[in-house]
Every structure is written in structure tokens, then in C-alpha cells.
Image: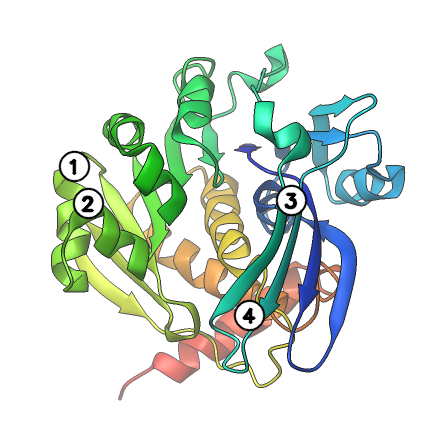
Amino acid sequence: MSLLVVGSIAFDSVETPTDCRENVIGGSATYCSYAASYFTPVNLVGVVGEDWPAEHTALLVSRNVNTEGLEVKAGEKTFSWKGKYLPNMNDRETLEVNLNVFETFSPILPESYKSTPFVFLANGAPTVQLQVLEQVETPKLVVADTMDLWINIQKEELLQLIRRIDGLVLNDSEAKLLTGEENLVKAGQAVLDLGAKFCVLKKGEHGAMYFGEDGCYVLPAYPTEDVLDPTGAGDSFAGGMMGYLASQDATDPASIKRALVYGTLVASYNVEDFSLDRMQQIERDSLDQRFAQYQQMLSID
């Protein structure tokens, strides 16, 4: 089954304690789509300016990402972000944001996209995410990502969204902000009380927590020695998770757990280089090898 991904497409400029890159391919939908493409075809919806290089689109197409829903606005510029990571590589400072075409992004789904069974609403304004829900036709699974900005300025719209989707993905601090609970177990349960069938709390190098009707569990991150750039790790995690579920045409608890592991493993590759550089060097068999290592790591006699 195919996966619909709607979100930002951007130029990223990233500075870490050891290196930097300027105007590399980025954006939540970009990372998510590329990660999902290891498992399933992807229908991408996003917007870019006329400064978007054709080779970036060609890269996505080469990964079986359908770009029919990619809008190119003449005379305008692509969304851009510039940030700097602190030495711990977990905390970062945003130095510059230029929304450009993304400021007025109003997604219009091509007719061929509307019946896509699996839908991921990558990080973006809840008002925009709700627009997508008005266009999709009886999807099997809808999952959304969010962030602190939307919790602060569009909370009511976000709460509306949560009541209409199956799963919510957010990081631990965002879960605390959304629910007012400092304890993550209570925060996860509180997200379910808001209407989501399940939620996933991303904890960076400490892995992820899952909450659903079938209970709660914690998955550790895959041990990664060389973390060069964490940008897009959370989006890659979500893309791997959703891509695997779409490939299996499954939403049952056991499949979700395996999907979370694959999401964890895609993210572990993503952080090993800037932008999509490391992910361009691997294929599905690389993920399957790490899956086996991950299983062995967690096995208890």
C-alpha cells in the first residue's frame, strides 16, 4: 500500500561542533518521504519556490516518491531554516527561519492521492493538517506530527485534529506542554484521553515510548557512535514507521511495534551524516541487518 505524506520541504543550513553545511535538502516531508521509500511508494504533497533544484526532485523520484503533488511557485523562494547544534548534539539553536512559500501553504491533493490508505501529516500547522483530512477518502490509518509552536499558537485546532486522527507523534517536552503533565507516562495517557488511539513520544538518543489501547512500552535508540547531524531524525523515524506499516497494510499492535523499530533504525542512519547523505548510501537490506542486531541487543535469556 502507498503512503501519503504532507509537510514542509526546505533548504537547511546546519552548524554542528565539528562541521557545517549550507542550503542542503531538508524539511519534514522530505525526510519522512525518503525514509518511507525504503518500504513503500510515497505520494508527496508540498510546496517549493523556483529556486528549488530539479535534481532534488529527481532524487525523490528515484526513490519511488511521486511528486505530482509538489507545487512549484514561480517567482518565490523555498522555505529555509538555519540552526546550530550545541556540543551535546541534542539541543540546538534556531538562527534563522524564512517561511517563504510555506507561509501560505494550502495543500491540494491530486485526485490520484485522495484514496491513499495510509496518511502521515508531517509537522505543520494544524489548520493545514485539517485541510488534508477534508480531502482524503476513508484512509485506513492517519498519523500526525506536531511541535511546541503549534501547541502554543494553535492549540484548539490541534485538539480538533487529535480527535480526528489515529496516532500522534511528538517529543517528550511537547507531550508535557500539550498535557500539562511532567511525568511521561501520565503525559502519554493524557494524549490518549484527548482522542488519539495511540501516541509515540520521541526521546532522541533515549529512544521512544508508545502508548495505546494495548498498553505502554519503551524502545531504546540504536547505539550510534558517529552522530554528525540529528536534523530530520524525528521525521525519518516517523517515515520509517509509517512506510513499514503501509508496506504491510497493517495497523495491529504487533505491526506497530515492528514499525517503531524500523523507524528507530532509519533514524540511526540519518544522524550519521548531514541531510540525506547517509540515507542515500543504504537500502532496505541495511535496515534489515540492523533490525537483526537490534533484536539480539534486546533479547533476554
Q: CA distance from mark 3 to mark 2?
A: 27 Å
- The disc, 4 or 3, on the residue closer to the chain's N-terminal end is 3
Name which residue type carries label 1: Leu
Q: CA distance from mark 1 to mark 3?
A: 29 Å
- The disc, 1 or 4, on the residue closer to the chain's N-terminal end is 1
Residue 45 visible, this orientation: no
Q: Nearer the viewer, mark 4 or mark 3?
A: 3
In the rendered image, which residue does mark 1 sit on?
194
- The disc, 3 or 2, on the residue closer to the chain's N-terminal end is 3
- The disc, 1 or 3, on the residue closer to the chain's N-terminal end is 3
In the rendered image, which residue does mark 2 sit on?
191
In the rendered image, which residue does mark 4 sit on?
268
Name which residue type carries label 3: Thr
Name which residue type carries label 4: Ser
Residues tagged 2 and 1 counted as in contact (Cβ below 8 A) = yes
Q: Secondary structure at mark 1?
A: loop
Q: Secondary structure at mark 4?
A: helix
Residue most extreme to the front: 95
Q: Nearer the viewer, mark 1 or mark 4?
A: 1
For image coordinates 55% across by 70% down, the residue present is 268
Q: Secondary structure at mark 2?
A: helix
Q: CA distance from mark 4 to mark 2?
A: 26 Å
Q: Secondary structure at mark 3?
A: helix
Numbered circle sitting on residue 30: 3
227 displayed left or right of 298: right
